[in-house]
Image: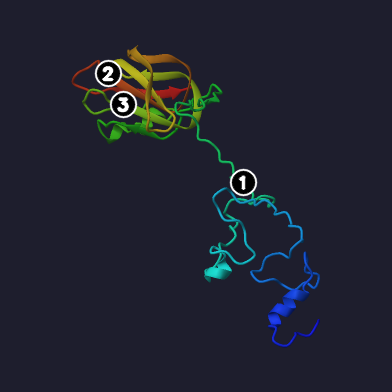
Amino acid sequence: MVAAAVGVPVWFALRAEAPIGGNPAGVPLAGGGAAAGTPEQPVAPSSAAPGTAGPSSGASATDPAATGQPGPSAPGPSGPARPGVPGKTPAATPATSKPAAPGTPKPAVTGRPGTGADLALRRPVTVSGLEGDAYAAAKAVDGDDSTRWSSNWSENSWIAVDLGDIWSVSRVEVLWERSYAEEYHIDVSTDGRTWRTAVSGITGTEGEVGTALADVPARWVRVVNDRRHQDKYGISLFSLGVR
């Protein structure tokens, strides 16, 4: 650098020494512009959408570090799976049995096949009523044809015997006394509560009357009077047999 001449301003002397057309010393020029002759660098296109500001090197207004607010937490196990992260497999639901469809018929009840012996012999008996203690219900199933059961003096009298198990009943035998039922029917039951008529409209007479049944499953067998032969008495029988 040439010393400034006496009386010449320093800034004028410095400007006179700067080479024309360049700034090889790299002295920054006033205004912050690029040095003369330096080629401009291409500017990379912004990836921001039109009308929005591009990314900057500093923290943005939504940056948690700039705002002081906590950032969003990562979704927990129950949240949606993130790309590349396997989601949580839901637990398998245990299988449950379905109830039977309405109207499904119950399995048919079958009885034990009979052996030909009297299934009513000395079995428990119940009756609608008694004429007196001398004509107890048990005398109808005691195996003695000289003893008898007699009902009270009323219509619709009945006698029922418990066979002890569900049997396939094919025949009912009644040994009537002179006070017999002119008409009667036979009911059967497998539980002692629900009864159904197996045979109706049976004609009675003095002596033995046998009635065939179509192998009906039954534990209880009941003989019911529909019409008495003698109005002044009930019904009376010497024996009740079931096979």
Q: Is residue 214 above or below residue 194?
A: above
Is 78 situated left or right of 183 in this image?
A: right
Describe residue 171's horizontal placement relative to residue 236 as left or right.
Answer: right
Q: Quadrant of residue 24?
A: bottom right
The residue most toward the left is 232
- Please name the residue that numbered disc 2 is placed on: 226
Would you say residue 179 is visible in this rendering?
Answer: no
Q: Which mark is residue 92?
A: 1
Of labels 3 and 1, the one closer to you = 1
* Rendered position, 9 above or below 169: below
SS of the residue at dot 1?
loop
Secondary structure of the residue carrying tag 3 is strand
Residue for badge 3: 158
In the picture, measured across the screen, residue 239 lies left or right of residue 86, that is left
For the residues bearing labels 3 and 1, Cβ distance under 8 angstroms: no
* Residue 175 screen position, x and y as percent: 38, 19
| The N terminus sits in image quarter | bottom right
State the scheme by which the image is colored.
rainbow
SS under mark 2: strand
10 Å neighbourhood of mark 1: few (<14), some, or many (≥20)? few
Amino acid type shown at disc 1: Ala
Residue sitting at 42 percent across and 14 percent down? Answer: 211
Horizontal and vertical percent position of residue 198? 40, 18
Which amino acid lies under the numbered mark 3 shown in the image of this protein? Trp
Residue 113: percent from left, percent from top: 56, 23
Pointer 3 or 1: first along the chain:
1
